[in-house]
Amino acid sequence: MSTQTESPDTPLVAMRGITKAYPGCLANDAVDLTLHAGKIHALLGENGAGKSTLVKVLYGLLQADEGHIEWQGEAVNITSPARARELGIALVFQHFSLFDSLSVLENISLGMAVPANRALEEKIVEVSNRYGLPLDPNRQVYTLSVGERQRIEIVRCLLQSPKLLIMDEPTSVLTPQEVNDLFVTLRRLSDEGVAILYISHKLNEIKSLCSEATILRGGKRVATAIPENESTHSLAALMMGSEVVVPARETRHASDKVMLQLSQLSYATTEQHGIPLKDVNLQVHAGEIVGIAGVAGNGQDELMQVLAGEVRLKNPLQLLLEGVDAGSLSPSERRMRGLCCVPEERLGHAAVPSMSLADNAFLTAHYRTGLLTGGLVSQGKTRRFTEQIISKFNVQCNGPASLAASLSGGNLQKFIVGREIEQQPSVFVVSQPTWGVDAGAASAIHQSLQAMANAGTAVLIVSQDIDELMLISDRIAALCAGSLSELYATQGMSVQNLGLLMGGAAIQKEAIA
Amino acid sequence: MITLQPRAEPSKLMGFAAPLIALVVTLLAGLVLFALLGVPVGKAFYAFFIEPVSSVYGLSELGVKAAPLIMIAVALSIGYRANVWNIGAEGQLILGGICGGAVALYFYEVEAWYVLPLMITAGMLGGMFWAAIPAFLRTRFNANEILVSLMLTYIAALLLSMLVHGPLRDPDGYNFPESRLFHAAATLPVILEGTRLHIGALVALLLAVGVWVLLSRTLLGFALKVNGSAPRAGLYAGFTQNRLIWFSLLFCGAAAGCAGLFEVAGPIGQLLPNISPGYGFTAIIVAFLGRLHPIGIIFAGLVMALSYLGGESAQISLNLPVAVTGVFQGMLLFFLLAADVLINYRIVWRAKGARV
């Protein structure tokens, strides 16, 4: 490490007048950003505000059209990520760049260009233990959940002892306790003199963690604020440009009619590192929203597969739809019976990336909406149905013919959720409805989920976003190691208690009682 | 400096243009090859590309060669869209020839209308049986269908050879390894008097149109495409992978078997140790040259048929070896794969050291 000869006021990084244009869009318009060693700086903004572009310029993935970057007071030209790492910049991506077929150890070794040997393995274990990020270096990445994959990225960065750590929405997959642990880690890192650029839309987190915030909107820096002195509402207003519409907690009166029932559901997956489901019991009534919290990799994937019918149950009575056994039905038969599901992974699972939106609408909607007439695909009806989803759910795209892969994550999610809602299911199961979606779109999705429940649909949300579940679900439970806790009314449930449930604490209580 | 820059979206234009670029480059490379062999370029060009199609008979021969290519390639394209890689259409073709031909020989004494339909049915069933083996092994044991179907091709060829050397050999044939000539009732009707152009050409066109409708308008076609590009999405939507694998392979087996029967009941008229100049393999190139689209495949089939005729013509008039056909087909596939890069990338000319 070089000895710092500059005055303590010299910023670690100063980005000045960064401008970056894409064809048809000015992603960054003369943006300034100053980061100091030992400070945690928030970068706030909606999707499309230019956060990613700015970060990519800083990390050498993109070159700015105008403006320059100073590193410890000297102008530098960050031409590549390798150059950025040389300077001491580490980035935890929101979307992970991992090789599925390799192990955790091999992925980290590739990312750092060091051999995958015993020493690296020990370092990984040490760092992951120190920062509360449990990770088995020898697991194959394809067997890991989204949350576990993110841990690899974080550990990979921490191994490089960076001077500047950039974190892109890091907490969306952690329990409150784990978030606290991470914050302890981040604060410790910042005390050690590391500058942290923290990108998030969770205003509470930013208020509690960050000492400065830069707010972007439409490619421009609209404000630099001290989060402590702002309310979450004023921060949100700065970010969105107008007062945010946060759906108010609604009290619903669920009917007594049980639409979806899981009883003593056990399912052992054939996947190598899959989580077996153990005696899961759950009832979802018409007109209520039930939330299932839990850290990634605790059986969510298996539960979704079982619900969607991607795997069948040996005992069909373990899954009842409106009181009738449905555990052995195929996905199409379940749809006909009114059960629509949205899996977590948008591209490649909920939608076919290389196909048009119209084709993707047809994909699941043809069972319930008559898009198939006389055995033939009705192209006119499919197009009209697609246009209906696009306009109703405000999907930004170039019409029904645009490819699913060409949409931004938030827009595609709106489209997928819209596609299922438009089929008017009687039971709606959705995993991670707002993962990686900007605040505006998330709010729109939450409103439509609530509208569905009000109209009498039984809604089940499997999510790792606790704020989301606390906001819109009527009853809540947590999944831990394949076991589902009891259901509790969300009102009166504290985040701390929910965190305990997510850690499996309630199960111990039951065992004692 | 030339660099390849990823495109934001795959270029539709290049999807159409790539086969044409490949054709032109193949042509140029072929002419260079002829020049290096010391053959006058103009004469070679004429012999290879013009002479074969300069008469009605030549054109009819083009149809004769193109028919099996189109039939098989159209059927293969279904599987290729669904990520089912049947490489053994040649073997399925041979089995079709064997089974249909055996029926013709069994009814050797019978001159009746039903003989030909029976032969066609037997040919299709034979091809389906041969394709059912990789389908079963893939769906039951997850065995790779590329290897299984390819290896079965060699077994099929040896089976045919064994049969025409033994049980199916012409009893009055002086021990030549060939069967009796089929009777009129066991041979395909000719569409154009004085040529060998048989109803197989019409069947190929009908099949192409049928598959076009299947792929673009039916739920089955949609399911095949979804499973090809995103298998998990197919599972989620409730399309059964194994059923689609069975369908792709059996459909192709039937088409290839039928094409094989058309060969033995059409241009050949008997069973020989060798009934196909590699139609089943060439059809793979045809399928990709035609962009896995039935209409594209019709054109691609005609181009590849020309490579067979041109090769024959070049043998006769220029004394070039028969391998010239294979060289042209290989070059075409090679250049096509290269040109396909342009669908997802654009070529950018850039001064050295410029900013990215």
Image (tube, rainbow, N blue to C red):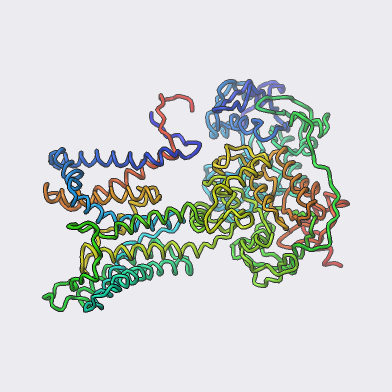
Q: Name the foreground residue: B171 vs A377.
A: A377
Can residue A177 be seen at all in this image of the molecule? no
Give above or below for A511 relative to B308. below
Does residue B289 appear left or right of residue A417 in this picture?
left
Picture residue at 63% right of the left edge, 37% below the top: A396
Q: Residue at x 66, y 53 (%)?
A: A342
Q: Position of residue A257 (x, y in %)?
A: 81, 63
Q: Is A470 displayed left or right of B8 in the figure?
A: right
**Relative image position of residue A443 (x, y in whole percent):** 74, 41
Left or right: A205 in relation to A3: right
Residue B12, percent across and down?
A: 44, 39
The residue shown at (39%, 42%) is B340
**Which residue is pictured at 32% across the width and 70% down the height?**
B117
Q: Nearer the viewer, residue A421 or A138?
A: A421
Seen in the picture, residue B248 relative to A38 is either above or below; the reply is below
Tell which of A170 and A111 is nearer to you.
Answer: A170
Tell me the quadrant of the picture where the N terminus of chain B can be found: top left
x and y percentages locating residue A393 in the rendered image: 68, 42
Residue B308 visible at all: yes
